[in-house]
Amino acid sequence: MKRKTFLFGKRSTGISIFSATTIILLILSSSCDLLFMGVEKKYPRYTPSYAWKLCLEKVWDTSNPYTEGRYLYLLEREDMETMYLVKRDMETGIDEWTGNKIYIGDGKNSSNIVKIGDTLYIMRFESGLLYCYSDTDGKLSALVQIGSTKEEISRNRSLSNTIMTDGRALYWGTNDLLKLDVMAIDYTQGHAIQIRPPSPMHLNAHWNGGELVSDQLIEDNILYLLTCNREYPNGYGVVVAIDLQTETIKWEKQLDNIEGYSDSKLCIRDDVLYVLTNSFIRIDKRDGSILNRYDGEIAPPSIGNLAESTVSLHKVRYDNERLYYITVRFTRGHKGWHSDYSLMCIDAVTLKFLWSVPLEYGSYHTPLTVVNGKIYIITYGAGLLVFDAKTGKLLGVDKTISGFANGIHVLYKNHYIFFNRNLDDKYATISAIRV
C-alpha cells in the first residue's frame, strides 16, 4: 500500500491558456445551457487551507474512527475481502502502524472501535468475532468468538453494530443488554479463536417488551438507553439509566407518543440527556425528571398534495447551546418517492426552532460538523458546504471535495480531518484542513 503525505503551507495555482477558438466555443456552449436550462445558480466559493494530505493507493473505503490524544484509529478497506486497522498521527498524517488483516467474508458491517488499557477492540457481529489489537504495534493479540454455535452467535449480535465500554468490560444491546468481561480473554493466543460468550444483564423486563431504537451511551459508569413499543397507539418509549457498577436500574422514565425511529438519538450535555426522535425531550440525567419537551414539527412541512410523508433525523450535533441536525422528509406522490433534505437548528435549552436551510444535494447519511461558528457538510456530488452556524447562511462551496457517510469526519485541535473520495479518481486521500 503506497502512502504519500504532503504538508501544506500556501497553495500554488496554475493558469491554463486557451486558444481564442476554444474560448468562443465555451461561451457559446454556456449560452446554450442558459437558454435551454435556465440560469445556473452561483454559489460562493470556499477555498480550504490544507494542513496535510495523505494519498492512499488502492484504499477505497475508510470508516469507524476512534481518536485518543493525537492519534486516529481507522478501518481501511482495499478490496471486498480484507480490511486493516490503522493508527495515524493527526498532526502529520503519518501512520504509526498498520494492523493485521481482518477478513471480511460474508459480513458487511464492523462495530465501532473501543479501547481498554492498551488494547483496541473491534467486533464483526456477522461472524461473531471480536478482534483484539495491541496499541503498541497493531498486532492481533486475541481473537474471541461470542458463541459456540451459529444460533448462540446470532442471539448475541448487537442490534446497532455498536459496542461500548466503561473501561472494564464491553457492552452491547440485543433483546437484552449483554456484558463481556475482557479480563477473561487470553491476550497471548493471537489468531487462535477463544470462545467467550457474553452474559445477559437481565434488565429487559424494565422496558416492558420494547425494542432498542438508538445507540446507547455510557458516561460516569451510567449507561443510558432508549426503547420503544410500537404496538400501542401512537407508541411509547422508555428511557433507562443503568448503574454499571451495581448492574441495577438507577431510574427509568416512560415517554408517551414516541414513535421510536430507528435513527433516534441520545445526546448528553452537562447534566442534560437529550432524547431526539419524533419529539425532542430534555431530561435531567441524574434522576430522570423531564425538564421540557417539544412535540411540534422537526422538519419543514411538506409541499403540495402528497399522499404520504415521513421524517427522519440524522447527525445531531451540539454546539454553543444549539442543536444542529439534518432531516430527510420522504414523500410519495404521483411519480413515486421523493426525498427533501434540510439543515435544522434549534435552541438546545428551550427547544424552540431557530432556522432551517434546504439541502439540494444532501444524502441520507450526510455528515455534519460544527466548529468555530461554522457548519461543515461533505456530500458526494455537491462537495463541501460551509454554513454560518448562527444564521444558516451558505458561506461557500468547494466541489473538489467528495465523501460518503461511512467516511471519517474528525476534529482535532484546529484541524478538520476527513476522507476525500471520488470514484473517478485513482487515489483517495485523507485530508486535514484548518478550521
Image (tube, rainbow, N blue to C red):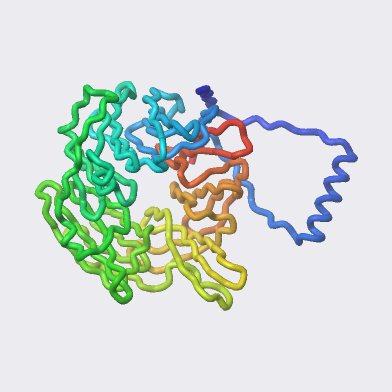
Q: In this view, does 85 lie to the left or right of 78?
A: left
Residue 190, quarter of the rendered image: top left
Seen from the viewer's position, the closer of residues 78 and 248 is 78
Residue 429, quarter of the rendered image: top right
Measured along the vertical axis of the image, is residue 45 above or below residue 303? Answer: above
Q: In this view, does 124 lie to the left or right of 310?
A: left
Seen from the viewer's position, the closer of residues 4 and 405 is 405
Question: Is residue 201 visible in the rendered structure shown here?
Answer: yes
Residue 407, image x, y percentages? 47, 41
Seen from the viewer's position, the closer of residues 89 and 240 is 240
Measured along the vertical axis of the image, is residue 301 above or below residue 205? Answer: below
Residue 113, image x, y percentages? 33, 38
Q: Which residue is at 49% across, 62% downward? A: 328
Residue 231, quarter of the rendered image: bottom left
Q: Which residue is at 20% across, 59% downward? A: 240
Q: Which residue is at 80% across, 51% downward? A: 30
Residue sitting at the far right = 21
